[in-house]
Image (cartoon, rainbow, N blue to C red):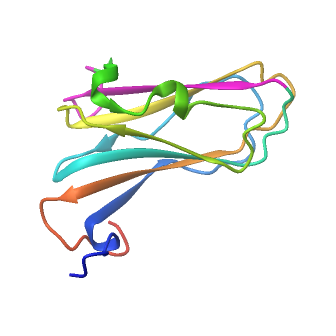
Amino acid sequence: MAIRDLMNNIHTVPLIVPVAARTDNTAIVSSIIDTLGYESCTLVLVTGTNTDADATFTVLVEDGDNSSLTDNAAVADAQLLGTEALAGFTFADDNECRKIGYVGSKRYVRMTVTPANNAAGNIFLAGVAVLGHPSLAPTANPPQ
């Protein structure tokens, strides 16, 4: 493989799938990401054009060993690359990306994005989990 080959050494998984505009303050809970077979995990958010004038969005990363995350716990800051505050955003952060890395030892991880003050706007948000450093490479394309 080429030295600059990233594609064959990552696996992407839908984190938050695109949906019609969200119009309230309901927490957006991501898919549960299984990190088995990968040594790194980065959670990436993509914002669209958000129309509220004062909404803020906080991020929480949780992990656990149960596939349904019934044992979920907030991830300690020492097990994150970047911060949850830096992964958060406001109404003014249109068409941008945010990322946070997970370096903890639990098998499963998920992200929750919680809007506040979104009384009248439309929220457009999607995300992907990028799993890297696979135990078996190249990874499948398209991802399975």
- Percent x, y of residue 32: 36, 39
Tell me the quarter of the image containing the N terminus. Answer: bottom left
Q: Residue furthest left?
A: 135
Q: Residue 81 at what x, y percent from top left? A: 36, 35
Residue 75 visible at all: no
Q: Quadrant of residue 5?
A: bottom left
Foreground: 100 or 116?
Answer: 100
Q: Position of residue 106 (x, y in %)?
A: 20, 32
Instruction: Tell me where the magenta segment starts and ends, as one range.
Output: 54-71
Q: Is residue 44 magenta?
A: no
Identity of the residue furthest to the bottom in this view: 2
44 with respect to 116 (left or right): left
- Which quarter of the figure has residue 105? top left
Q: Nearer the viewer, residue 30 or 43?
A: 43
Residue 129 placement (x, y as % from top left): 40, 49
Residue at the image position 24 percent from the left and 46 percent from the top: 35
Q: Is residue 8 left or right of residue 137?
A: right
Reply above or below: 22 against 75. below
In the rendered view, tell whether residue 144 sits above or below residue 79. below
The residue positioned 55% from the left and 50% from the top of the image is 17
Would you say residue 35 is visible in this rendering?
Answer: yes
